[in-house]
Structure formats: structure tokens, C-alpha cells
């Protein structure tokens, strides 16, 4: 078993992005500028947004963090989104989810201009991805593809099983793995909460990508010997042995599964860093979409 080190791979990607930013600066061009909007006080979201701001510093981007109170109305947030859409200084921006219950996330996503939607959630960007057209690809799936590519994981002709069908990870992931590209050219099966023989299907996967949001859901009997396992899950679970009282756990039972894998991503340090690095790549690409 070898660890797919997302932290090291993301650092290599960020080094490449930083080098391109240096070239832009040397030529007198505009430095990419990413804005992030955070509504409320969710601890996990705050940590994630702060990591994005730090990543901007690492690659030489300008960044703006806009923090709004929990009681911000939907109308106020939509007005801010329109303001960012029309701000030429901002190349791309994200609105961190989850949002408070009184705000319609779909409405917010659809209000973001596709060119500035560096999260890749807008329906237009999802549609262009499906057609193989230039676009912002959802950061987590794109990060996973980059992780496979940079670690020379063979995907062509393999059976890839994607666990979970969300519009953020599962569905775009299944499309990317089936496309005529490298990585890609897989035969893809998607399983979800209504799949009756999930265990058997997962156990047939050469590449198993798990994004179902249930801690340690995938166990050793669901993994084929020698499979590549990509764990997208990150859930805080209670742990009295830790000073903070919790630990991050993936959707895969790492200790139970690791000896059956050829490669596996750790949690933390696997997919998470690649998601942030992919967001930086999308922001860099946004400059050429103007």
C-alpha cells in the first residue's frame, strides 16, 4: 500500500501556479484576485476559507475575505454576488457552503457569473464540463483527477466505482473518469443510497472513489485487492483522546482497508489539499476567460 499524498501533490501544483503568477507579474499583467464570502460562524467553513486565503498568499494571488453575519438575508447576499460579478478587480469568487437555512443555495449558485464561478458549481459550467468544453471544473473532482495524473495512476480501461451522486463531487467525478482523456477512459459505475448490491459493486472496482458523507462507511469487504481508493469524506467525530475533542475521519475505514489497497488517500492530507489547489488553478484560468 502506498499513500497518495495530497498535501505534497498540491504543493507541487501550487509551485507551478506560483511560477505562472511570477511570469504574469514580470510581464506587467494583472495578478489573479480571488474573493471568498463566508456567511455565519460555522467552524469547519471558517477553517476551510482561511486555508484558501493562505493558499492565495502561497501562489501570489490577491485575495479578499468577506465575512457576513448569520442573519444576513438572501436578498443582501444576492446583491453582494451581483456586486462581485461586476467588479473587474475580482477574477473569481466563492460563496462558502453550507449557507444558513434561510438562504437558497441553488439561487445563490445560479446568480454567480459562470466565468467567475471558480468552484465550478454553476449549471453552465457543469454542462460545459459534460460536453468537454473549456470551463471551470468543480474543484474537488478536478483535484482528484490531478492527483491521479501527477502520481501516474493508470486509469484507462479500469472499472471505476463512484460512491455518492452529489452535483459537487459524485456526478462530475463519474463524467470526468469516463471521458476520453488521461486520466479517464474508465468504465464507470455510480452507486448511492438506493443501490441494493453496493458491497458487491464496490468490491469489483479497480478505482474506488468514495464521497457519501458517512464516516468509515467503506469497509475491507467492499474493497478489491490492489484497488486504488480515493476517500473524499471529511467528518468530525468525537475523540476524547484529542485535546480538541474530535478528529477528522473519512468515508473509508482506513485501518481496515489499507492493507488491501495499492494506493489510498489519507484523511486529512489527501483530497482536501488538492481541492484548494484546484481552486487556485481555476482562479488562474479565469483570467483568460475574460
Image (spheres, grey):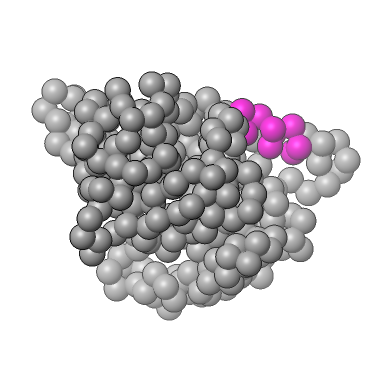
Q: Nearer the viewer, residue 139 or 2?
A: 2
Q: In which quarter of the view is residue 241 placed?
A: top left
Q: Is residue 279 visible?
A: no
Q: Nearer the viewer, residue 238 or 213?
A: 213
Give residue 83's position: percent from left, percent from top. 59, 70
Q: Is residue 17 magenta?
A: yes
Q: In the rendered view, would you say 212 is above or below 132?
A: above
Q: Is residue 140 left or right of residue 231?
A: right
The residue at the far right in this view is 27
Give residue 274's position: percent from left, percent from top. 51, 38
Q: In the rendered view, would you say 52 is above or below 80?
A: above
Q: Residue at x 65, y 62 (%)?
A: 132
- The stretch of residues the image draws in magenta is 12-21
Q: Residue at x 39, y 49 (%)?
A: 161
Give residue 107's position: percent from left, percent from top. 44, 76
The overriding secondary structure of the stretch rendered in magenta is helix
Q: In which quarter of the view is residue 234 placed?
A: top left
Give residue 264's position: percent from left, percent from top. 39, 30
Amino acid at each position: 500500500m502506498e499513500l497518495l499524498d495530497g498535501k505534497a501533490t498540491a504543493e507541487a501544483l501550487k509551485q507551478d501556479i506560483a511560477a505562472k503568477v511570477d511570469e504574469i507579474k514580470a510581464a506587467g499583467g494583472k495578478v489573479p484576485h480571488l474573493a471568498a464570502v463566508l456567511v455565519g460562524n460555522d467552524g469547519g467553513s471558517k477553517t476551510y476559507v482561511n486555508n484558501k486565503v493562505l493558499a492565495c498568499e502561497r501562489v501570489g494571488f490577491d485575495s479578499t475575505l468577506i465575512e457576513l453575519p448569520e442573519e444576513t438575508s438572501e436578498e443582501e447576499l444576492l446583491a453582494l454576488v451581483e456586486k462581485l460579478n461586476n467588479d473587474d478587480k475580482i477574477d473569481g469568487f466563492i460563496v462558502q457552503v453550507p449557507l444558513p437555512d434561510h438562504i437558497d443555495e441553488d439561487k445563490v449558485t445560479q446568480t454567480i457569473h459562470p466565468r467567475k464561478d471558480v468552484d465550478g458549481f454553476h449549471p453552465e459550467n457543469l454542462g460545459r464540463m459534460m460536453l468537454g468544453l473549456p470551463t471551470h471544473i468543480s474543484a474537488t473532482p478536478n483535484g482528484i483527477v490531478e492527483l491521479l495524473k501527477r502520481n501516474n495512476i493508470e486509469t484507462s480501461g479500469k472499472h471505476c466505482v463512484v460512491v455518492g451522486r452529489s452535483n459537487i463531487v459524485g456526478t462530475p467525478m463519474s463524467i470526468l473518469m469516463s471521458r476520453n482523456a488521461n486520466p479517464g477512459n474508465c468504465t464507470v459505475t455510480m452507486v448511492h443510497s438506493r443501490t441494493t448490491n453496493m458491497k458487491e459493486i464496490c468490491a469489483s472496482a479497480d478505482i474506488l472513489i468514495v464521497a457519501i458523507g458517512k464516516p468509515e462507511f467503506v469497509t475491507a469487504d467492499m474493497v478489491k485487492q490492489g484497488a486504488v481508493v480515493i476517500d473524499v469524506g471529511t467528518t468530525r467525530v468525537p475523540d476524547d483522546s484529542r485535546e480538541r475533542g474530535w478528529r477528522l475521519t473519512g468515508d473509508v475505514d482506513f485501518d481496515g482497508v489499507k492493507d488491501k489497497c495499492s494506493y489510498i488517500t489519507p484523511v486529512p492530507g489527501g483530497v482536501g489539499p488538492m481541492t484548494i489547489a484546484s481552486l487556485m488553478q481555476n482562479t488562474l484560468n479565469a483570467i483568460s476567460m475574460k
